Amino acid sequence: MTVRQPTAIDAIADTYTNRLAEIDPLEATSMGIPGHDHQMTDLSPDGYAERARLDRETLADLAKAVPVDDVDRVTAAAMADRLRPALELDESGELLAQLNVIASPVQYLRDVLDIMPTATTDDWANIASRVSRVPEAVHGYIESLREAARLGLVAAERQVEECIKQAAELADPSSSFFVTFLAEAQPDGAPASGPLAHDLTTAARLAAEAYGALVDFLTDELAGQAPTDDAVGRDRYALWSREFVGAAVDLDETYEWGLAELARMAAEQDRIVAEIAGPGASIEDAIATLETDAARLLHGKDALQAWMQETADAAVAALDGVHFDIPEQMRTIECRIAPTETGGIYYTGPSDDFSRPGRMWWSVPAGVTEFSTWREKTTVYHEGVPGHHLQIAQAVLNRDELNRWRRLASWSSGHGEGWALYAERLMEEFGFMDDPGDRLGLVDGQRMRATRVVLDIGVHCRKPAPAEWGGGIWDADKAWACFKANVNMDEAFLRFELNRYLGWPGQAPSYKIGQRLWETYRAQAAALAGPEFSLKDFHTRALNLGSVPLSVLPMALGLDAGLSG
């Protein structure tokens, strides 16, 4: 077998990734690139400017490079597709203004600690060093928010208020996560002592104080400039949608498709409800039936974690060699209870050398002690196998074909989250969701994803709302009524989710839009191949590409004239 030799374009991509790790140590930790865990990302305008310079220089280098094979052609197209929208967002000032309830520096500075190694004294020294730099990061972040405000870009009042609450929790000197987490350090199996203990205590105190300064800034300065309108408007929305989907979509057509998809999901759910609770039954009747089924109930976090692990492991065992070929390094996925209490479920990929395995995290809200599996089996498939774990770990493993950027740094939500939703439906197709309760959980989740296509585009682009949701123009109140009527989950979760959509425009619809495009490309591949089409081969080829933007995926799969083979 001929081993592919690295090319000039691979060198450009690797250089970009290495430089990105230096500029953005938080991202380096996320990518699993060692050597930067003790450092902190510069969140000031100067820091964003340095990242933009790197993007521009890399685009210029790519423009001069000549691809030597199809791998090169995909790399060049994918990098250009990712870097150009990033520069547009930088030039517009949008990156400086990031402030929302789920994915902004308010959360990043704390959340990175979840994936940092904690086994040794050196690991905890890295944590102490990084946390001690939280004050400079917060100071830079405040500078960026001030500059964005000068440009007229301030997060909506709702986001500012919620971020004040989150920051205040991290500022509390007695209960801040920084304080409690670092106080529990157990390097090499024993409590921290000596200089390390002092460094950890000091770093935690400084980080909490920095978040106190952030609370003051948000309360005393930014809140007074925050608009009451949650909508960002069509122009700003189009920028973010292009970034998250990884392709430009017709927002008006997608909104109408979202409405139709929502109606289709509701009808599918009604059929399953009748199967569970009888003809004429309501969704509440079906849920009551499922929630009182002892076989579906889990008691306590330990039972939840054990069920997650058992379900994930069973999926790996059942799919390997049948629907997918899963290499040895990827057969391990760790299921963990997250240290946070937001209610989210998420995946973090393996490190470059697989010393940190892929992990599925469940953030259990305070006070929640009972769990029902019917809602969440589909979530385990989404986050694990054949979802994010299979997708992300396969790219990390594919060193023979993919450069470092393709394996570790390339990501678009439309491709990644779209695959994970597609993977949920795959498990239904493969016969793993025949139980009507599990299938109701699958469709309930898909209905939620369709609902947020409608709400996200509807609110931010100020689209007309259907009469059943109040008519006129979409706003947060109408979105809340629609969300509650279509998603059967705890109200606190629904509030957080809606706040997420209102503050993170374009991200939530990328899941369902991505699934739509994955299904479209699969159908096109099947039509081209005819009777010779192999679904297993299609998936293998797609996963070996790593995460490429959805605008590039058809070319990468050979569905147009972009590739030679």
Image (tube, rainbow, N blue to C red):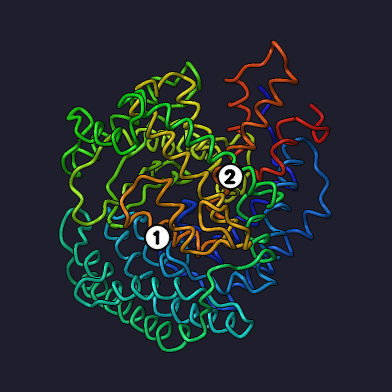
Left or right: residue 358 versus residue 464 is left
Q: Which of the 4 image quarters holds residue 317?
A: top left
* Residue occupying the far bottom of the picture: 220
Q: In the figure, 487 relative to 531: above or below? A: below
Tag 1: amino acid: Val
- Circle 1 SS class: helix
Left or right: residue 286 versus residue 238 is left
Q: Position of residue 443 (x, y in %)?
A: 44, 34
Q: Position of residue 126 (x, y in %)?
A: 35, 64
- Circle 2 SS class: helix
Q: In the figure, 115 relative to 4: above or below? A: below
The residue indicated by pointer 2 is 259
Q: Nearer the viewer, residue 450 or 131?
A: 450
Residue 215 tag number: none
Query: Could you tell me which quadrant the N terminus lies in?
Result: top right
Task: Looking at the image, tell me whether mark 2 or mark 1 is earlier in sequence order.
Answer: 1
Residue 112 tag number: 1
Q: Position of residue 292 (x, y in %)?
A: 19, 33
Left or right: residue 96 versus residue 363 is right
- The span from disc 2 to disc 1 (Cα, nearest Å) is 37 Å
Q: Are marks 2 and 1 in contact (CB under 8 Å)?
A: no
Q: Which of the 4 image quarters holds residue 507?
A: bottom right
